[in-house]
Amino acid sequence: MPLLGLSARLGVVALVAAVSGCALSGRADDGDGSTPSSTVDPAPSVLADEIGSAAPIVVAAGDIARTGNDAARATASLIQSMRPDAVLALGDNAYEDGSLGEYRNNYDPTWGRFKSITRPVPGNHDYGTGNAAGYYRYFASQIHGDEYYAWNAGRWRMYALNCEVDCGSGSEQLAWLQADLTTHPRRPALAYVHEPRFTCSTRHPPETELSAVWSALQGGRGRIMLAAHNHAYERFAKLDAQGRRDPDGLRLFVVGTGGAGLYPLKESCPNRQAAQDDEHGVLKLRLGTKRFSWKFITINDRVLDKGRGQV
């Protein structure tokens, strides 16, 4: 069910942007001013470990491709119109169990057109096939077998995390993240993972194991966290690892709207600033050197949420 009627929801989004600190600086802004293009152009042929663009366009969503899924085809067409520099597949990319056959039959005909510029993470459904073997084989050229990894997008350091394996306090993954953040102290950080630290869905609860990761990112110039898992869209205020408002906290986007059936959200949710659970779509990010902007755009070309923050 929708949390609000469309016209009401757009009004709330505009109000949030104007008075609730939609920008990291505390000032409202309308975003990057771009609109989805109706022209379909081929995606770039390859994504290097570092995107040289000063303000790369990165598109993200998770919970994507099922058999005969028209919604996944529609989100893929939407992405193609944006001509992104990189695509982030946020896990549960090929249903039901992430087998190689499901990646080839369900994911490849839709989001597979962006495979060469995709930097994915796995979800719980991807681990439905022995240690996510289908995921690692399908994306072999993109992730080289790594369970988690980092790369650069313009000025930004991008962290592809995996909490389907241990990511909590004392884990190898957390130690790796802390070390990499220390090595890149001047780069703003964006992290993405399948299960969200905060969410208000009727289906899946928040992932508390991410608290240590969240704290590490916040202590190391972390700005944005992306997740999926709950099949809806949510954006939260800047928060610390315990969910308290913090001007130096991370901003979380839950983008489980890539194609799988949508889940209803709870009407009330602390610190949530935007939400919708009735349209598929993707999050478009422009990661600049001094500012970043976001838009959540649906397959019907509706911009349901947008804003801008300072790096």
Image (tube, rainbow, N blue to C red):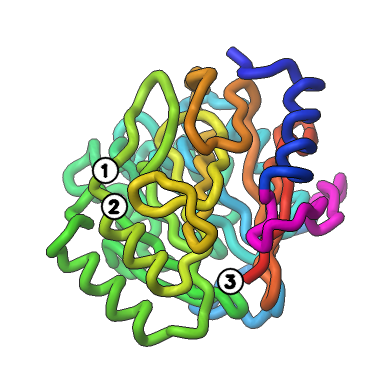
In the image shown, does 87 or 69 lie closer to the viewer?
87
The residue under the point 25% across, 74% down is 176
Left or right of 171? Residue 176 is right
The residue under the point 39% across, 58% down is 139
Q: Give the residue type at disc 2.
A: Ser
Q: Is residue 84 visible?
A: no
Pointer 1 or 3: first along the chain: 3
| Residue 18, x across and y down, in percent | 78, 44
Q: Residues within 10 Å of mark 2 (few under 14, many from 20)?
A: some
Pointer 3 or 2: first along the chain: 3
Q: Relative to 179, is 67 above or below?
A: above
Q: Are marks 1 and 3 in contact (CB under 8 Å)?
A: no
Is residue 290 a member of the stretch shown in magenta? no
| Residue 112, x across and y down, in percent | 54, 49
Quarter of the figure with the N terminus: top right
In terms of image quadrants, where is residue 161?
bottom left
Q: Which portion, as a residue range, is magenta? A: 21-40
Q: Give the residue type at disc 1.
A: Thr
Give the labeled residue for mark 3. Answer: 46
Q: Are marks 1 and 2 in contact (CB under 8 Å)?
A: yes
CA gap between label 1 and label 3 equals: 35 Å
In terms of image quadrants, where is residue 200?
top left
Q: Residues within 10 Å of mark 1 (few under 14, many from 20)?
A: some
Quarter of the figure with the C terminus: bottom right
Is residue 24 a member of the stretch shown in magenta? yes
Give the labeled residue for mark 2. Answer: 211
Give the labeled residue for mark 1. Answer: 208
- Farthest top residue? 1
Left or right of 107? Residue 123 is left
Q: Relative to 69, is 224 above or below?
A: below
